[in-house]
Amino acid sequence: MNRPYISIVIDTITRDDYGARPLVDDLHATLDGVARQILPRERFETIVVVDNVRDAELEEVVRRYPFVSIVRSPQHSYFAGKNAGARAARGEIVALLDSDCEPAPEWLSMLTAPFADASVSAVAGYTRYAGTSFLAWTFAIPDFSIVVGNKFGEASAFHLNNSAFRRETLLAHPLDARIPRDGGCVLLCHELRAAGARIMYAPQARVSHGLDFAQRGLLKKHFNRGFDGVAVYRVDEHAVLRGTRLFRRFGALALVAFFPRRIVTDWLRLIRNYKQIGISPATIPFFAAVGVATRFISLVGGLTAVRRFGHAPVATPASWR
């Protein structure tokens, strides 16, 4: 059996979510996790994407982790970094990971196994916050549980901190670097589906995500999700998102109208998929309430963005600042 070569692409812009520290310290849990992969090392390469990092810091990363290759991003952008890594990748499969995520030893093997089916274009893994704290347990659900599988094993969505793609798919559908930070995965998912791509779910491909709200705060994290969501609607040139046309017509009123629909969708997902998500029936009301709170914060962020930028589509990359 001819097994495809794999490129792991790790962005480092997630360093912005934590206190300042050397790059190698930011990466150590992630790269230690990569070093522990059960997949033979000759089957994959590891690319770390950076921007505005001193050469001395890069040299220390390569000294400590000699299997790492460094690629520079053309701009300080989460999505531009992912694109730069995909372009530099030598593998047929590109596995995306963030620098604040620690993969389980079987992560890469499980994440890339579905590509044995030539019809599969992308695979989503299972992400939860690291640790057993109350905050990690609580906010892992609204932040990551949108990813579930249907009866055919197809994924409902994917997060770019834990997903894999055929390289040709990412090159044909690059991430839109006009989006400041959040929401690009949603847009890409809908673009791929519109193109007829198959996206599978690999729940055994597990990643522990750092508590990125510890530094910037929960309010800011979810506010930014709503704020950046406006950018997603504005750059959705082919209107692959269901709400794009309504948003461009009604602006803030559309965001307000979307709010209750999203709450109902969240609740139905919790009820129908609580076993997959990993919660008990008794906790569904609690997580439903948490979801309302985080959705409301995101709504405020979206309304703020509309007030600042309006709701017209973005004509060129330079028009979104």
Image (cartoon, helix red, strand yellow):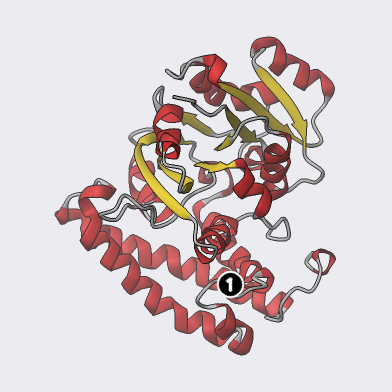
What amino acid is labelled 1 in the image? Answer: Gly
Q: Residue at x 56, y 15 (%)?
A: 42
Helix, strand or loop at label 1? It is helix
Residue 22 visible in the displayed image: no
Q: Residue at x 79, y 30 (%)?
A: 53
| x and y percentages locating residue 10 in the rendered image | 62, 33
| Left or right of 312, for residue 196 | left
| x and y percentages locating residue 68 in the rendered image | 66, 20
Name the residue furthest front.
1
| Left or right of 29, for residue 278 | left
Residue 196 visible in the displayed image: yes
CA neighbours of label 1 inside 10 A, class few (<14), some (14 to 19), many (20+)? many
| x and y percentages locating residue 170 in the rendered image | 63, 48
The front one of 244 and 211 is 244
Q: Residue at x 44, y 45 (%)?
A: 124
Where's the N terminus, which quadrant?
top left
The front one of 280 and 122 is 122
Name the residue furthest left.
282
Which quadrant of the structure image shows residue 240?
bottom right
